[in-house]
Amino acid sequence: MIVAEVVAHQLLKRFGAVTAVNAIDLSIGDGEFVFLLGPSGCGKTTTLRMIAGLEMPTSGKITIGGRNVTFLRARYRNVGMVFQDYGLYRHMTVFGNIAYPLKVRRMSRAEIRRRVGEVAATLRIADILDQRPDDLAGGQLQRVAIARMLVRDADVFLMDEPMSHLDAQLRGHMRAELRHLQKQLGVTTVFVTHDQLEAMTMADRIIVMRSGNLHQYGTPQEVFERPDDQFVATFVGEPQMNILSCTIEEDGGEPAACGPGFRAPLDRAWLGQCQRAARNHPLRLGIRPEHVSLRETPDDEHTIPAELIAFEATGTENLFIVKCGEAEITACMPRHASARFARSEGSRYFLRFDPAWLYLFDGESGWTLAHAVGSRSASVREPRA
Ligand code: ATP
C-alpha cells in the first residue's frame, strides 16, 4: 500500500511583490483529511496548487510519500484534483469525462469500463453516464468531478472549494457524504475552503491561514477550544467570539479582567503571567457568545448591567447584542432558555460571563496568553516574542 503523507518545509511563494504563501511548514499524515481554512486571498489555493504541481514554489520543499516533488510537474505526481468550477468537458458524456484520465494513460477499454462502473456505483451516478454536463444539476456535477478524481487511484486528493456552487441543503448532505467517502477510501486529502462550518464538520485537522501565514494547525476541537491567537479565535466559531479591551485588576484579593462596563473574575493562576504581559502590551478578553448569558436580576457582584441594541433569532438560538458601558457584547442563548427576555431596543438586563470559558490575548501580537477551557483550571503561556 502506498504511504502518501504530504510534507511541506518552509514553503514560500511570491507573485512579484505579493507573498502569497509565507514559508509555511506542514505535515499531513497518510490517509488524513486536512482542511486549508482562511479568508479570501490568504494563500489556500496557492498552497494547494503547489502540492498539485500546478504552481512552482519560490523556495522551500514538498515531499509526497517521502519523494521530493518540489519542482515536479503535476502529471508526474499522481495527485487527483477537483476544482471549484469542476472543469468538466461539456462536449463529452459523463462516462467520457470520468474515463478521460484513464484514456490519457492508454488503459484498455475493458479496464476503463470496469473502473468507471465501479466509481459510478460508489458515487451513485451509474444512471447518468450517458448524459452531458449541461443536463446535470449541481450535486450531480460535483459527483462526476469527484468520480473523475477517484477513478485514477491517485496517491493524494486535492479539492479546491468543491461545494461552493451547491445550495445550503445539498452542501449539508454532501459534507457527510464526502467525509464518509474519504474515510472509506483512506486516501490523504487536502481540501480548501473559507467556510469554517465545512472545515469544522469534516476535517481531521485544520490549517488556519491568513495573509500567507499559517496561524494554527490542529483538530477542529483544538482550533475552537484552544485557539493559538485572536485571529483563529474570531475566525472559527459563529457567532464570532467577543473581544474586549481590558486591564487586570486585583480588588479585594480576587483578580479580574476589567473594562469600561464589565468585570470578569479570573483564575489566580493567570495573574502573574498576564500582569507581566500587560506591563508592556494592552490586553484583550475573549468570550464566546454562547458563554455569555442574560439575567433579569443581578445574581452576584459579577453580573454586568447591559442594554439591548439589537436582537436576532436564528431559529434554534437567540442573539442579544447589548451594550455594557463602552463595550458591545453578543450573547447567544438557546431559544427556549431565553424566550422570556424582552427583544425591544433599550431593554435592560444583566449579563454573566461563564468563568470556565475565558481567553486572554496579547493586544499587540494577538497571541493567546491564557485560557480557561471548561473549568477554572487555566492554561497560561509566555507572550509571543
Ligand atoms: P480565495 O479563497 O479567494 O481563492 P486564497 O486563500 O485561495 O483565496 P490565493 O488564491 O492563494 O488565496 O491567493 C493568495 C494571494 O496571491 C492573493 O493576494 C492573490 O491575489 C495572489 N495571487 C494568487 N495567484 C496569483 C497569480 N497567478 N498572480 C499574481 N498574484 C496571485
Image (spheres, grey):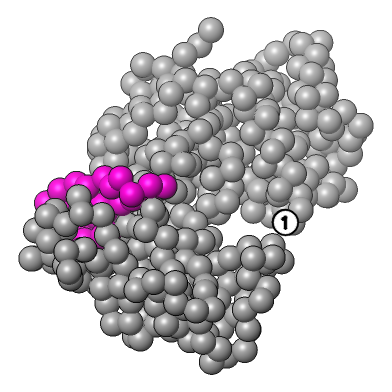
Image coordinates of residue 56 in percent, x first then y, are: 36, 38
24 or 296: which is nearer to us? 296
Residue lying at the far bottom in this picture: please name it: 346
Image coordinates of residue 252 in percent, x first then y, are: 17, 69
Query: Which residue is painted at 30% across and 73% down in the image?
Result: 263
Query: Which residue is painted at 36% across and 29% down in the image?
Result: 27
Q: Is mark 1 within 8 Å of ligand 1?
A: no
Answer whether residue 282 is visible to the viewer in this image: no
Q: How many marks?
A: 1
Q: Locate residue 12: give its quadrant.
A: top left
Q: Locate residue 199: give its quadrant.
A: top right
| Left or right: where 49 falls relative to 187 | left
The crowding category of the residue bearing disc 1, from other C-alpha atoms within 10 Å (few below 14, some 14 to 19, many at least 20), is few
Image coordinates of residue 358 in percent, x first then y, are: 35, 57
Q: In this view, does 52 lie above or below 14?
A: above
| Left or right: where 21 falls relative to 275 | right
Mark 1 highlights which residue? 168
| Left or right: where 28 falls relative to 177 | left
Image coordinates of residue 14 in percent, x first then y, are: 29, 50
Q: Is-magenta flag for residue 249?
A: no
Query: Which residue is painted at 39% across and 53% down in the image?
Result: 356
Q: In this view, does 52 lie above or below 347?
A: above
Span colored in magenta: 360-385
